[in-house]
Each structure stands twice: as structure tokens, then as C-alpha cells.
């Protein structure tokens, strides 16, 4: 059982938690770290975790984008291509699901959680866009958010492990505040286009250093 490191009982449930809660955690851990039956990331990366830890280090420039010429003198469109889009799309979907499930397990009353790509706006911008620079900035921002997402997932799992199976982890590390930004900021981020949302992110001091 993937929940053994987290203190699961012989009956398959976490201590003091319902079977439904335990399944929520189990599914999240499987989705995060287990090898996939399909291989959207190629043969080097077998799990969402593997690819998510690698993705922020990838280099992207305009030469990697594909041009899609349009008929009747319509403007050229750009895309990152099918294979990269498949890999990034699977990663974003998996991370969004894990980032939704783990906070629910920790505290079901908490409604303001980190979402990697709200409404998949960034993925849609990578799929096709008029401006290649928007695609490159979106990739850069998504790389930064992926790094934040993996660190947040690690904190969630440490907190769960410290709570249900105390180990060598520092309890203060696992119990640290790990909730996302204020509801007003989250609400603002949930609306608008990919360009607008990336603009909001890169206007922040912690993201500004990542502008290419």
C-alpha cells in the first residue's frame, strides 16, 4: 500500500479517518509518484513527479516553436508542438488533481488552495497563439509555477506524515503554514487571459527575477 509511509492501518484506512478520506489520499499519492501505464513524458520519465521535477530546468527558445501558416494571408499561428504539449498537459492535469486532493485531506474546510493552471489557460496558450513571445513567457511562468507546485506537494506530504506517522522530519517543517494566497488575489488570478495572468505573476517580486 502506497500509504504505508503515512501510517495507514491494516484495514487500509488512515488513523481516525474514513475510508473515503483514505482513498482520497491514496489516489493523490498514486497519481503523484507511481509509474504511469501510458508514457506521455517519453521513456525517461515514468511519473508525474519525475517529469514535474525535470520540467523547470528545460530550456525553451523561439527556434523550438512551430509555425502554422494560415491561408488567405491570415496571420501565422504558433505552437509548441504535439509531443511537448502532451507531456506538459499531462503534468499540469496531474499536478492540479494532486494539489486539489492533498489539501482536502488535510483540512476539508480549506477552500483557497494553490492551482497550477486555473481553467488550463496556460496550456491553451501553449497549444496555439498569435504571438510566439507569449508562448515563451507562458512556458517560463509555468516552469516557475511547477517548481512552486512540487515544493508545495512535498510540504503537504510531510505534514501528513508528521501528523500520522511521526518520523525523522522536523515537526515544525511539516506543520508550517502551507495555504495559498488570500482569496482576493486568487480570485483575481482566476480571471482573465493567459497573458493577463502571466503579467500579474511576473509583476510580483518573486516572479520578476524569472523573466527571460
Image (cartoon, rainbow, N blue to C red):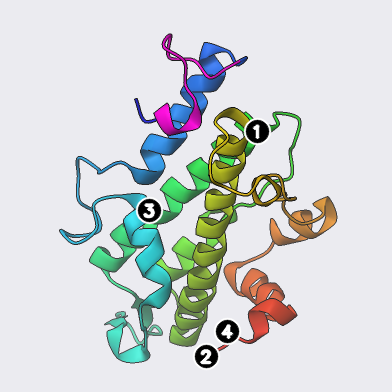
Alpha carbons under labels 4 and 2: distance apart = 6 Å
Question: Residue beneath label 3, please?
Answer: 49
Asked whether, in this view, residue 103 is left or right of residue 95, the answer is right
Instruction: Give percent across and percent down for residue 166.
Output: 58, 35
Circle nearer the N terminus (1, 2): 1
Asked whether, in this view, residue 82 is left or right of residue 186, the answer is left
Q: Main secondary structure of the magenta part?
A: loop
Circle nearer the N terminus (2, 3): 3
Instruction: Give percent across and percent down for residue 142.
Output: 50, 69
Q: Is residue 8 magenta-colored?
A: yes
Q: Which element is circle 1 on? A: helix
Question: Residue beneath label 1, please?
Answer: 106
Residue at 68 percent across and 46 percent down: it is 113
Are discs 4 and 2 less than 8 Å apart at CB?
Answer: yes
Circle nearer the N terminus (4, 1): 1
**Bounds of the magenta segment:** 4-15
Specify the label residue 96 is tagged with.
none
Amino acid at each position: 500500500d502506497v500509504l504505508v509511509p503515512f501510517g495507514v492501518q491494516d484495514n487500509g484506512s488512515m488513523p481516525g479517518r474514513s475510508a473515503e478520506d483514505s482513498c482520497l489520499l491514496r489516489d493523490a499519492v498514486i497519481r503523484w509518484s507511481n509509474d504511469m501505464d501510458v508514457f506521455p513524458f517519453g521513456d525517461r520519465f515514468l511519473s508525474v513527479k519525475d517529469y514535474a521535477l525535470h520540467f523547470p530546468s528545460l530550456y525553451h527558445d523561439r527556434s523550438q516553436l512551430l509555425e502554422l501558416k494560415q491561408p488567405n494571408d491570415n496571420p501565422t499561428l504558433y505552437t509548441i508542438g504535439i509531443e511537448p504539449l502532451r507531456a506538459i498537459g499531462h503534468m499540469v492535469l496531474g499536478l492540479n488533481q494532486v494539489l486539489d486532493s492533498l489539501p482536502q485531506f488535510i483540512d476539508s474546510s480549506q477552500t483557497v488552495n494553490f492551482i497550477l493552471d486555473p481553467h488550463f489557460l496556460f496550456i491553451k496558450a501553449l497549444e496555439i497563439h498569435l504571438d510566439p513571445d507569449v508562448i515563451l513567457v507562458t512556458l517560463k511562468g509555468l516552469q516557475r509555477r511547477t517548481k512552486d507546485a512540487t515544493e508545495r506537494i512535498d510540504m503537504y506530504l510531510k505534514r501528513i506524515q508528521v501528523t500520522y506517522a511521526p518520523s525523522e522530519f522536523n515537526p515544525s517543517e511539516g506543520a508550517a503554514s502551507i495555504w495559498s494566497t488570500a482569496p482576493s488575489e486568487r480570485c483575481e488570478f482566476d480571471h482573465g487571459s493567459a497573458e493577463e495572468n502571466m503579467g500579474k505573476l511576473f509583476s510580483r517580486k518573486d516572479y520578476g527575477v524569472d523573466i527571460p
